[in-house]
Each structure stands twice: as structure tokens, then as C-alpha cells.
Image (spheres, helix red, strand yellow):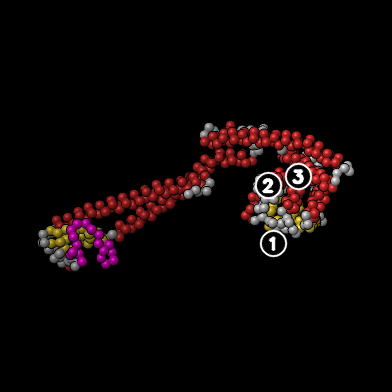
Amino acid sequence: MEFKQSLARRIVVVFALMSAFVAGVFAVGIVATVHVVERKLTTISLSGNLHRLLMMDNADDWRFQPDKDELFFATEGQGDLAMADDLKPLPEGFQEISRDDKTYYAMVQTVGDRKYVLLRDQEDLKQRERLLFTVVTSGFVLSIILAVLLGWMLARRVMAPVIRLSRQVRHRDQLLEMAPPLSPDYAADEVGEVALAFDEALSKLRAALGREQMFTSDVSHELRTPLMILASSCDVLLETSVLDPRARQQVTRISRATEAMTQLVATFLLLARDKDNVTAQGNLVTLRATADELTEIWGKQIEAKGLAFIYRPDEAMTGLYNQTFLHSVMGNLLRNAWHYSDHGFVSLTLTPTGFTVEDSGIGIAPDQQDAMFEPFIRGPEKRGEGLGLGLSLVQRICTSQGWEVSLTTREPNGCRFTVQLLKV
């Protein structure tokens, strides 16, 4: 069974349990020892007192009186010394008996044809045992309290370097090339080993991220030239009159795909650069300008598929945003709605904090919605030849820019994607 508790709390619990065990063993040992010793001393005391009483036996008169908490009886005794019927069957030796709602220690001895019984009331002994039990219990509770306090103080002292290390890893940007190593700040102990392991892991991660950024940047940069050639060639072909309607339609599709690829390459190139300078890179546009541009592109395609396209720009927010990123996020969501809707509508609504894209398509089950933003995850109906990177790219851009994207189910069917550009 795995206990999901903090290390500090585990240390306190271990101290408390250890102290409870040790104090409990000592408490039980003390109580048991006192009980055995008192029983042994009581046996010796009663045996000695009974022996002295018997030594003073002269004829039928007893001049020696027992202790105040003792009672003496003898067969054929007279008056207070007369033995009651319940005492006559007692065997010889030391024992415990109950009579008249009281408990007694009894020492029984037979001399000749006469039986002698010496009783001692256990009330005083019980009071001492209760006092001892109270003292032992108080010591047990006090030891646990002290153990908890000591464990808490020790846990704070032991966990201080661990907490410090975790805060450094959490709050310092260790992925930067100029980030100082963590291990020199710690002693050569277990925490120092953890810090050294962090340094090694972060060094490897920085190298991997550097290679990824370099690869993405190089590929994106190299793809620009062939894409420009494709775009210019399509423009030249579309300006000529030698193409028949079918060929012109295909060239138009190539031109549109080239434009989308160029936009995607620009997005990847920006994401591969320094995060702190991403927003400042490229042109800044308003939400309304980007929505108007994409409405011209996707509105026609959505309507050509037999769907109704609804555009609500009245409550558009103000502010400037990175054109490439905003264009990519909104364009991917519109393309996704167009791709997975066969009838009904697709709507784009601008709000005071961002925008919403809704559709009446096949929808996504609630238990699969979070996974849709993972790379290479596609919808329930894998249409076309896509790789499932569109929503992943949307999520990555929103995370990079501090935006928020969410997916909810639209009743009776369809999806609703909400992008918050301004946190409320």
C-alpha cells in the first residue's frame, strides 16, 4: 500500500509510532513488574504475619491483633475469630478471593486439625495501582506529544534542503543555457546527489531542446523557398487562360494548400524561437482583422460543403496579437469544424475575451476531450490523411502565448471550442 504523504509528515508519523511503541513497551513492563512485585511482597508479608500470629497461640485466647487492613480467622475460634463457612473450603497457600463485594488476598495454613486464614483488603493496593496507571498513561501520552514535536522540528531541519532544492527547480528557469548548476549549493550528501542528478538531467534536456529547436528552425527555413516557388507558380498558372476549368480548380487547391503550408511553417519557426521574444516577432493584428480574413477563406469552403456559416463579430475584443499564432489557432479550429461536420452549421463568435468556434458535427465524447489536444490523436472518425497535429498545435500556441483553449460538448451534437485571449 502506497502512502501519498509528504516526507515531513512521514518523519513525524515514524517518530510518533516509534515513541508509542517504546513508551508502550515500557508502560506495560512497568505495570506488569509492579504487579508481580507487589503480589510477591504481599505473599511474603501475609505469610510472615500469619506465622507470627500462630507463634503467639496460647490456648484459646489470641492477644495479638492483625494489621488494620487484615482479618484473621481460625477454626474453633471465638467471636470475631470464628471462621465463616465460605472460608472453610479454601485450599492452603496464597490466593485471591471475593467476599461481601470486596476482594482480598488470602493466606491459608493448616496446623494439625485447625485451619487458619489471614485476609488482607486489596483496596489500598488498587488505589496505588490506579495511581500508577494514571502516571504511566500520562507519561505515555506526554512521550507521544514530545515525539511529535521533536519529529516536526527534525523534519523541518531535514527537509529544509529538499524544499529549497524543489523551489529552485520550480522557480528558476533551469532550461536556460546560462542557468547556474544546483549541486554546488548543497553538501555531498543525499540531497547533493539529487541536485547533481537534476543538473545532469537538465543538461541533457537543454541539449535535446536545443537540437529540436535547431532542427525545427532549419526545416522551417528551408521549406520557405520551395513553398514560395509553388505559390508563385500557381499565381502564374492562374493568370493564364490556357487552363481548362478542371485544371484551374486543381491549381487553386494547390495554391490554397501552399498558403496553408506557408502559414504552418511560419508558426513552427516562431515556436522554435526564444519564448520571451515570440510575441514581438512578426506582425501584430486585432482579433477582428484575423477573423474577417479567415471568414473570407473558410466561409466559402464551409458553405460549398452545404453547411451554414454563422459569423458574429459584434463583441470583438480590442488589443493586438501575433498574427501568425492567432491566424493558426483560429484557422485550425475552423478547419477542424469544417472537416468533421456533414450537415448543420459552423459558427465563429468573437467575444470580449476571445472567440468561440461551434459546429454541429459528430462531436467528441467527454472522456476523450482531453486527449484531443495530444499529438497524433484524431477524432472518432479518422477522416482524410491528417496526422492529428492540428489541435496539438493549437494547445502549444495557446500555452506559449498564455492563452487558454477548452473543448466542451454542444447539445444535441457537435463541439464548442473556446479560446480565451484575455484572462477573466
User: Horizontal and vertical percent for residue 209?
Assistant: 66, 36
Residue found 75% across the figure and 46% down from its top: 328
Bounds of the magenta span? 86-103
Q: Residues within 10 Å of mark 1 (few under 14, many from 20)?
A: few
Q: Mark 1 or mark 3: which comes first in sequence?
A: 3
Disc 2 residue type? Answer: Gly
Which image quarter: residue 133? bottom left
Q: Which residue is mark 2?
A: 388
Residue found 64% across the figure and 35% down from its top: 208
* Label 3: which secondary element: helix
Q: Residues within 10 Å of mark 3 (few under 14, many from 20)?
A: many
Which of the two discs, 2 and 3, sits closer to the camera? 2
User: Horizontal and vertical percent for residue 56?
Assistant: 14, 57
Q: Which residue is mark 3?
A: 325
Q: Is residue 60 visible?
A: yes
Q: Which mark is residue 412?
A: 1
Asked whether residue 2 is drawn in magenta, I would say no
Disc 1 residue type? Answer: Pro
Vertically, is 63 above or below 25? below
